[in-house]
Image (cartoon, grey):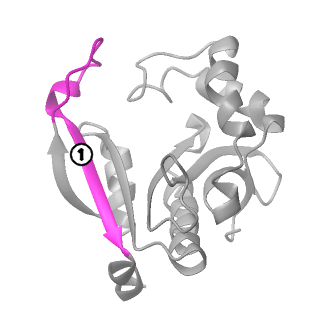
Amino acid sequence: MTSRIRLEPMTTEHLPFLVELDADPHVLRYILGRARDASEVHEFWGPICADTAADAVGLGWWIGRRLDDGGFLGWWDLSPGKPVLEQPLQAEAGWRLARRHWRQGYASEGATRILEHGFAMVGLSKVRAETMAVNQPSRQVMVKLGMRHVRTDHREWDDPLPGSEHGEVIYEITRGEWCRSR
């Protein structure tokens, strides 16, 4: 929890919120370049919502709700990769917010909380995040978290999105860097 956000483990009960979130093409601009319909959301998110392997080690996916009214904000994650190790040392962070909540500090506020959790409670040594190089709002969140740009990858895509020619940027932060920045 933060001063404005209640984070709760993502479950299949959250699928209606995920349908709403992914129905906005602006939200998925740098992911798919289009909205997902309800069946695509259920196909994609259903297994993630039902998978509790990461939860067992303190990682996974969280739904964020506003503390003042319980309204759905979006999601945050710390994904350990597959298979989930008994004591993961690294994870990938991510977030996605409903457009009506953009530019209000929620992304960095929720991400700060999950990084605190990952380093202090789970014992991670490093957290990374990635996005399209042209996705300036997500990159700004990464910088605000204290993450540093470590490389830009240029990947081949079957159906490239506009801006993909600029690459995918990878940011990371170690536990030591995190502790020194707090």
Identity of the residue drawn at 55% across and 53% down: 84
Check residue 68 for magenta coloring.
no
Location of mark 1 (residue): 169
Residue 16 in the image: state x and y as whole percent. 78, 28
Residue 98 in the image: state x and y as whole percent. 60, 37
Residue 161 in the image: state x and y as whole percent. 29, 19
Q: Is residue 153 above or below residue 66?
A: above
Q: Quadrant of residue 21?
A: top right
Residue closest to the eye, 71 or 150: 150
Q: Quadrant of residue 7?
A: bottom right
Residue 95 in the image: state x and y as whole percent. 52, 47
Q: Say what secondary structure mark 1 lies in.
A: strand
Q: Is residue 29 above or below residue 178?
A: above
Identity of the residue drawn at 53% across and 59% down: 85
The quadrant the C terminus occupies is bottom left
For label 1, the crowd category at 10 Å Cα-Cα, with few meaning under 14, some 14 to 19 and many 20 or more, is some
Identity of the residue drawn at 69% across and 24% down: 19
Q: Is residue 43 left or right of residue 167?
A: right
Q: Is residue 169 left or right of residue 23?
A: left
The quadrant the N terminus occupies is bottom right
- Number of numbered markers: 1
Identity of the residue drawn at 35% across and 83% down: 176
Q: Is residue 135 left or right of residue 74?
A: left
Amino acid bearing label 1: Val
Q: Which residues are magenta?
A: 154-174
Q: Quadrant of residue 90?
A: bottom left
Q: Is residue 55 left or right of residue 27?
A: right
Check residue 161 for magenta coloring.
yes
